[in-house]
Image: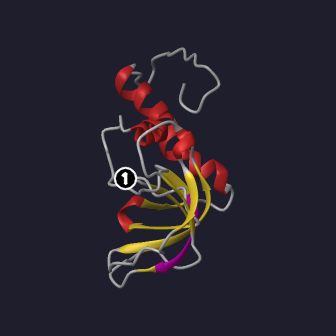
């Protein structure tokens, strides 16, 4: 499979498209054919070595992605091959043709949601939701005014 790989800390120009081994599947994991991946500030921090998670080299960045399940581990329940899903990848891995991760980090997406929107959902929407509900402390029956630049999560 092809994957974007990081072999040294730096700016995104250190990333290279390479052939990579398909990860083996453990009983509690799923294999996903990636159809879209989010690109976020946190990804550039990871590539630069300044993110809180520093995977060993070489690694594949990409903290969020969406696609279809192609295989499930023997103990996975509630997910099946062919299902459309999004995934949150704490250690990266989304910038590849396929990824393997714990089933607990995978969420089915509705038929009406396209893969690009699903891939942007965890970080962009999650950050916005957290900012409103925890940082701004917006509660029911309270008005909040939001202003942000046209980035995923401002």
Q: Residues within 10 Å of mark 1 (few under 14, many from 20)?
A: some
Q: Which residues are magenta?
A: 66-71
Residue where numbered disc 1 is placed: 91
Residue 82 at x, y percent in the picture? 59, 77
Front one among 60 and 89: 60
In magenta segment, residue 62: no
Front in this rendered view, residue 6 or 140? 6
Does residue 105 sit above or below 80 in this rendering?
A: above
Q: Is residue 113 above or below residue 120?
A: below
- In depth, the one of 38 and 77 nearer the eye is 38
Which residue corresponds to the image point at 52% horizontal and 44% vertical from the top-left? 14
Residue at the spot 54% in from the left edge and 48% down from the top edge: 15
Q: Quadrant of the N terminus?
A: bottom right
How is colour applied across the structure in the image? secondary structure
Residue 121 x, y percent position in the rendering = 54, 45
Q: Residue 151: where, in percent of width, then height?
A: 61, 28
């Amino acid at each position: 499979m092809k994957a974007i790989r990081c072999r040294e800390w730096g700016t995104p120009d250190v990333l290279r498209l390479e052939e990579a081994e398909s990860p083996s599947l453990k009983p509690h994991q799923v294999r996903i054919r990636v159809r879209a991946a989010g690109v976020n500030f946190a990804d550039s921090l990871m590539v630069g070595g300044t993110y809180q998670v520093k995977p060993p080299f070489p690694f594949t960045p990409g903290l969020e992605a969406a696609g279809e399940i192609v295989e499930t581990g023997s103990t996975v329940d509630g997910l099946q091959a062919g299902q459309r899903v999004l995934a949150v990848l704490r250690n990266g891995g989304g910038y590849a043709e396929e990824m393997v991760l714990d089933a607990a980090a995978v969420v089915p997406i509705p038929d009406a949601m396209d893969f690009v929107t699903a891939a942007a959902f965890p970080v962009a929407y999650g950050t916005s939701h957290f900012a409103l509900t925890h940082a701004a402390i917006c509660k029911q029956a309270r008005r909040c005014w939001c202003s942000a630049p046209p980035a995923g999560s401002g």
